[in-house]
Image: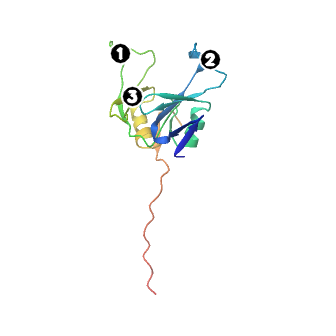
Amino acid sequence: MDTLQFGKRLLPVEHIALVEPFDPATQKNMKTERAFQARLVLVDRSSILIEETVANFAAKAGFRMLAEDNVATNPLIHFSVESFSATEDFPTVKQFQARLLWKDFDERQQSKLLLTAPEAVLAVAVRGQVAASGPGDATEAAARPRRRRRVEPSPR
């Protein structure tokens, strides 16, 4: 899946940084008959609403799921991760633990706060490991092509 189409708009997959849930109930002034369930966050932080769940989109597009946040990250994007703690200058309502960072096409830093532990975000979003049974526990290596051993021809 290299290119996605949303209505008339064509979008290269590498322009999507992540996918997050969308709750239409939080948008009081939004008037639409469409059942939007997720938001594609583009590299430049603009967004596109979609009518499928984060998990369904992630499965189809090959994105990496952070189950605790219900956020899927694009494996084509180079992310970095920081630990996060709320401060007096930057208080938060939720107990965010990590900041996921990437650069947009103009080299400006973009980020998203996450509830998932920073080590788990690093394992899944950066290293491509698959989270094990519990949220935030990333221990299994992601499926990747295995290198074949060279077999020397047998002498005849």
Lower position in the chain sequence, tag 1 or tag 2: 2
**Separation (CA) of disc 1 from disc 2:** 32 Å
Q: Residues within 10 Å of mark 1 (few under 14, many from 20)?
A: few
Residue 64 percent coordinates (x, y) = 49, 39
The amino acid on which the numbered mark 1 sits, given as a three-letter code, is: Phe
Residue denoted by label 3: 111
Give the percent coordinates (x, y) of residue 82.
Answer: 34, 30
For the residues labelled 2 and 3, the Cα–Cα distance comes to 28 Å
For residue 122, which quarter of the picture?
top left
Q: Report the residue marked by disc 2.
A: 31
12 sits to left or right of 104: right
Instruction: Tell me where residue 37 sits by quadrant.
Output: top right
Eyeballing the image, is 16 above or below 150? above
Nearest to the eye among marks 1 and 2: give it: 2
On the image, the x and y values in percent for residue 155 come to 43, 84
Q: Of all residues shown, which one is farthest toward the right? A: 33
Front residue of this view, candidates 112 and 17: 17
- Amino acid carrying label 3: it is Ser
How is colour applied across the structure in the image? rainbow
Sequence-wise, the earlier of marks 2 and 3 is 2
- Please identify the quarter of the rendering in which residue 43 is found: top left
Q: Nearer the viewer, residue 70 or 7?
A: 7
Name the residue at the front extreme.
8
Crowding near the residue tagged with mark 2, few <14, some 14–19, many ≥20 C-alpha atoms within 10 Å: few
Q: Which mark is residue 90?
A: 1
Instruction: Please report the residue visible at 36 percent of the width from the left and 24 percent of the height from the top.
Output: 84
Q: Secondary structure at mark 2?
A: loop
For badge 2, the amino acid type reads: Lys
Find numbered disc 1 in the image and state the secondary structure of the residue it sits on: loop
**Residue found 42% across the figure and 70% down from its top:** 150
